[in-house]
Each structure stands twice: as structure tokens, then as C-alpha cells.
Amino acid sequence: MTDFYDDLETRSPQQRLADQVAAVAAQVAHAKANCSAWADILADVDPAAVTSAEAIAQLPVTRKSALIELQKADMPFGGMVDTTRAHMNYVFTSPGPIYEPGFDVPDAWRFARALHAGGLRKGDLVQNCFSYHFTPAGAMFDNAAKEIGCSVIAAGVGNTEMQAQSFHNLKPSAYIGTPSFLKIILEKADELGLDASSVSRAVVGGEPFLPPLQAYFKERGIQVLQGYATADLGNIAYEVPNGEGMVVEEGIYLEIVRPGTGDPVAPGEVGEIVVTTFNPHYPLIRFATGDMSAFMDGQSPCGRTGQRIKGWMGRADQSTKVRGMFVRPEQVAELAGKHAEINKIRITVDQAEGKDSMLVACETDSPSDALLVAVTDNVRNVIHLRGDVQLVAVGSLPNDGKVIDDQRQY
């Protein structure tokens, strides 16, 4: 495949990193100068010192929970938006509540690249079945499809019979929406004897795309590729034909860190996705998604040279209560930071005879009785609970990103 959206997709990895580090530094300077919240968060950061991936990894991480608190104090956007650059066209609402701004500038949420990879081209008629109501997904994809040159049927969600009739009468060539709703529309078309054969391509998201559903669309001859995005950040990564994993969007800088920290994990290790966008209107810098994934080795066989991730692999927010006390990933990170000999920690919570138990497994190349005693003491000091400590060999803990594994049956 040689039909790429632009030259950014085939840059050398070295050039991409240099370009993106420069873009992050510019975004830090812009956000500090134009957004009151970022001026506070980045108060101790010198944008001129952001010259490498290592320097970016030292910047503070901002979590979605912080948006809620900032917005409560300064409605509607918590001082995180630069509204001087362009007219704000939309305000969206997500659970929390969190209010998100929308700017109707070309490819504002960077979905055009994902749609292009999914086979959408200028002149295509596309049925957009993401919601246009409060949430941003409908407008996000509408904006990107128009940037490519597609015409959009603003279908939204629900009204299954009308959706099927639209397939039959208007004959769109592509579908955008959740995979499960596409199946519902196709089944309704079959039930009513309507022709849905014009839909040969789809770009989906918003829910897990499980193998049985993938097989269903393949049997019907529909190419369906999925993307990974959030309401705050827009597009993050996307599938390509004949490729494994998801290619990271060119308009962001993506890191994978150990949950509860801002520390990048080793290559291939599962951790939390942290994203910096280059959007000047709504800067988000080292924004923690709460989602888990891992980088993949090598380049996509499609010819794109960008990094790939394995897709969504669970949630990073593993906080749980043990004997009435919260145990959080940040505490696990603090505990590990007290012992240079420890590579990784995993707390397993279980229950026997109605009582909670806590096992603290620590990977180390230097096991000793002294280390065991020191970690046991610090478990009480940091976690504020007693737990059994076990020193294990490096590499023996699962590579699933979990630092707290709650195995209790509720």
C-alpha cells in the first residue's frame, strides 16, 4: 500500500521524534502564555529545556479527574482553553461532568487520517451514526469526513428502521459509528428486505470490537477498521488494512507510563497511555487517558513508519479498598521509589474466610532478608496496611500493566 494521507506518515523515526519534541516544546510555551491553568501546572517548566523525550518525561502528568476540579473552580473549561485563536463553535458534555470545547477548523480532532486509512475518499457518501447529542463523537467524525471531501448523512444513533432505509435509498459507501450498531442496521435491513450492499467500508470505535463481530462483517464483505480516541483528545491511534495493532496518530506525542506515575515503561511493557496534543486551542500536555496499552516492535507492513500500539488493554485506575482503606497506584509507585533494588511491584488483593489479604510481590535481582524487612516496613508506612511481601525474580510478574490486582469475588 502506498496511498498515504500525507508525507508525515512515512517520515523516518528519527525525524518524527525531532519534529514531535519541538512541537511539544512549542505547545508548552504556548499553553503557559495563553491558558491560566497551564501557567500554574507548568510554572516550574522552562519550554526551552524541553529538548528530548527524556525531558518530556519530566513534565507533570495531568489526569482527567483534574479537569473536573479545575472546571468546578473556573467554569466552563478550568482555564485550559485558548479562545483567542479561533471562534469556539461547540461545547460538549461528558460524564463527570466535563465540558469540552469544539473548534470547527479543518480536521480539528485529527480523524481524517484514520478515515483515509479506512478507505474513505473525496466524493464518498458516509452515514455517520455517532451521536451528535451532547457528546462530541458525531461532530468529530463529521468534521473529518468533510475535510476529506466526503458528503455526510448526519444520522446519529437510534431510529434503526430509518437507518436501514437510508442505506437502501441513499446508498452510502461507508459507515461511521459503533460496530454493534452497524450490525443492528444490517440485520434490520435484512428483516425488511432492504438493500444495504452499498456499504463496503466502515470506521468504528466507542466500544470493544470483538472477534465474532469482526467475522460477521468479513462474511458480508465489509472492510471494518477501528480507531481509538477520547472525547478530550480526539483521535489517538487507528487500524490500517493488513496491519497489526494501531498506528499512532501523527498529530500527537504518545507515551506509555507506569500507572500512578509519569515514568515511561520499558519497550513492550503494558502501561497507561499519556498524550500531548499539538492543538493550540485546547492544549493537553501529558494528559493521562486512564487506558492501558503497549508499544509494538517494528513498523507496520503497510509502509507507515509511525509507532504502533496494541490497542486498548484495560483501565489504569486500579484503586481499590482493602480493610476499609484505599490502595492506589500512586502509593505503589511511591513504595517502589523507596527501594532502588526493586524493578516492579504488584499488589494482589484477595479474601479468605471473609477477611481481606494483601500480597506485595516485588521483582528484584538482589533479594535479601534486609530488603524483605525494609519493604515490609514501608508497606505499612506508605500503604498504611499490613501485607505479606514476596521478593520474586525480574520478569516473573505478568506484563499486563496491573500494579493492583483485586481478585476478590463480589
Image: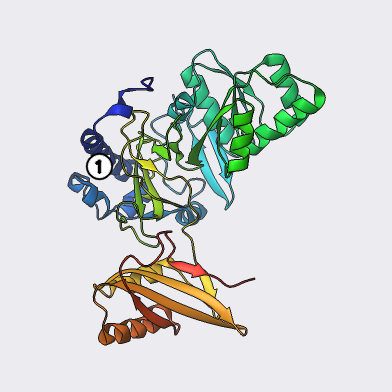
Percent coordinates x, y for residue 409 in the rendering? 62, 71
Instruction: Give me the residue at 66% from left, 32% from top.
Output: 182
Instruction: Give me the residue at 41% from left, 45% from top.
Output: 80
Percent coordinates x, y for residue 221 in the rendering? 60, 25
Residue 169 found in image quarter = top right
Q: How is the image coloured?
A: rainbow
Check the picture and name the quadrant holding the N terminus: top left
Percent coordinates x, y for residue 34 in the rendering? 34, 41
Q: Is residue 398 above or below residue 374?
A: above
Q: Is residue 192 left or right of residue 279?
A: right
Q: Is residue 286 left or right of residue 65?
A: left
Percent coordinates x, y for residue 293 in the rendering? 42, 50
Q: Is residue 102 left or right of residue 152?
A: left
Q: Is residue 176 above or below residue 256?
A: above
Camera-side residue of 157 and 300: 300
Mark 1 falls on what kind of element? helix
Instruction: Give me the residue at 22% from left, 51% from top.
Output: 54
Residue under pointer 1: 25
Camera-side residue of 5 and 146: 5
Residue 271 found in image quarter = bottom left
Neighbourhood count class around disc 1 (C-alpha, 10 Å): few under 14, some 14–19, many 20 upward? many
Outermost residue on the right side: it is 192
Q: Is residue 397 left or right of residue 11?
A: right
Residue 366 found in image quarter = bottom left
